[in-house]
């Protein structure tokens, strides 16, 4: 690792061995508006269930291709642990979708588009072996590092979002979000370390951040609108930017200010994911998560 003043500066910490935890969540008693009285925040967070199954399976697909390029044994073990965790996250969020459908909110029209995005647009493409194929693999590795900046941001947020507890959020949904969020915090350095190991170019990092950020904003607002407009209990409901700012101020969603602040953080040349979030907090949550410790939390 370079010691130049602008090089990424990891915070010294004990290395955590990453492992996928078996989880079990029982959805029978979770209401449609699992954050009582706040369908907008409920559905904005529900967008995770639309994006993550296809998105995290795509992470796994790309990382299996990049493993042969990893020359560091510790990093290889981290990437393998990351793959196991992300596969479990995708499956756990996928399990929520039939429950939403039973409650009258069929997510299929939206998830079909998300599947196309990850499988076709961001898929392998028919490229000749060599430079072009390598370029496309590195672009995707950099994109995943940028997306993981936001999964870690959201993980840290949800672990500390006490307002969700105060408002009586459904305990099963909260546990799913916090188990996933805690593992995102736990493995927050892996995607960045992998990108730095196999490429590390600053221009690529900045360019793919811009792509990832734009795509996430676009997909998220579209997903929230989709849920609000198709909510069987809310005829004629709409999602709006005003609701988003209000939820951020109230603490039921991340604030716009915190999201804006995360931009220069990622673009700083000395950024390293270990500078943010708390591994100790994540590990403590994982030790107490009902869903991750052998029991359905219904
Ligand atoms: Fe994940
Ligand atoms: Fe992740």
Image (cartoon, grey):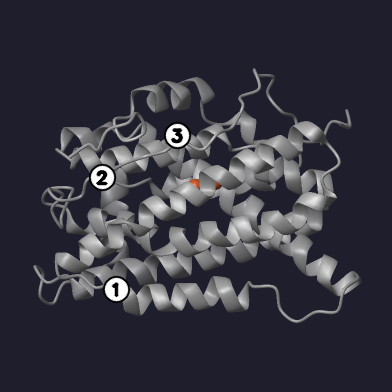
How crowded pointer 2 is (Cα within 10 Å; few <14, some 14-19, many 20+) is rated as many
SS class, disc 2 = helix
Residue at image x 44%, y 63%?
A: 51
* Tags 1 and 2 touching, CB below 8 Å: no
Q: Does 254 sit left or right of 6 as displayed?
A: left
Residue 178, given in percent of the width and then of the height, sits at 36, 37
**Image position of 183 with respect to 286: above or below:** below
Q: Nearer the viewer, residue 63 or 32?
A: 63
Image quadrant where one finds the N terminus: top right
Separation of residues labelled 1 and 3 (CA atoms): 28 Å
The mark tally for this picture is 3
**Image position of 72 with respect to 139: above or below:** above
Residue indicated by mark 1: 226
SS class, disc 3 = helix
Residue 113, given in percent of the width and then of the height, sits at 44, 78
Separation of residues labelled 2 and 3 (CA atoms): 14 Å
How crowded pointer 3 is (Cα within 10 Å; few <14, some 14-19, many 20+) is rated as many
Residue 187, given in percent of the width and then of the height, sits at 58, 36
How crowded pointer 1 is (Cα within 10 Å; few <14, some 14-19, many 20+) is rated as many
Instruction: Nearest to the eye among marks 1 and 2: give it.
Output: 2
Residue indicated by mark 2: 173
Q: Which mark is residue 182?
A: 3
Marks 2 and 3, the one that precedes in the sequence? 2
* Tags 2 and 3 touching, CB below 8 Å: no
Q: Is mark 3 within 8 Å of ligand 1?
A: no
Marks 1 and 3, the one that precedes in the sequence? 3
Does the rendering let one see residue 262? no
Residue 36, given in percent of the width and then of the height, sits at 12, 48
Instruction: Nearest to the eye among marks 1 and 3: give it.
Output: 3
Residue at image x 21%, y 33%?
A: 165
* Tags 1 and 3 touching, CB below 8 Å: no
């Amino acid at each position: 690792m370079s010691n130049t003043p602008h090089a990424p500066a990891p915070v010294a910490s004990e290395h955590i061995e990453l492992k996928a935890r078996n989880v079990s969540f029982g959805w029978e008693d979770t209401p449609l508006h699992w954050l009582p009285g706040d369908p907008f925040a409920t559905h904005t967070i529900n967008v995770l269930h639309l994006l993550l199954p296809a998105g995290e399976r795509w992470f796994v697909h790309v990382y299996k291709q990049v493993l042969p390029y990893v020359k560091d044994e510790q990093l290889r073990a981290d990437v393998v642990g990351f793959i196991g965790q992300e596969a479990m996250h995708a499956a756990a969020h996928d399990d929520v979708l039939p429950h939403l459908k039973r409650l009258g909110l069929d997510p299929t029209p939206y998830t079909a588009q998300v599947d196309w995005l990850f499988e076709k647009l961001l898929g392998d493409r028919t490229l000749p072996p060599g430079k072009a194929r390598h370029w496309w693999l590195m672009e995707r590795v950099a994109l995943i590092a940028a997306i993981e900046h936001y999964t870690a941001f959201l993980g840290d947020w949800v672990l500390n979002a006490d307002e969700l507890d105060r408002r009586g959020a459904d305990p099963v949904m909260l546990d799913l979000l916090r188990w996933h969020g805690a593992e995102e915090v736990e493995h927050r350095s892996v995607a960045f370390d992998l990108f730095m190991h196999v490429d590390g170019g600053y221009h690529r990092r900045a360019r793919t951040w811009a792509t990832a950020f734009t795509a996430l904003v676009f997909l998220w607002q579209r997903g929230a609108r989709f849920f609000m407009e198709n909510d069987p209990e809310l005829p004629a409901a709409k999602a709006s930017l005003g609701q988003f700012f209000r939820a951020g101020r109230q603490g039921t969603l991340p604030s716009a200010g915190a999201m804006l602040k995360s931009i220069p953080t990622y673009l700083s040349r000395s950024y390293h994911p270990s500078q943010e979030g708390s591994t100790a907090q994540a590990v403590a949550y994982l030790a107490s998560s009902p869903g991750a410790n052998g029991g359905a939390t219904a």
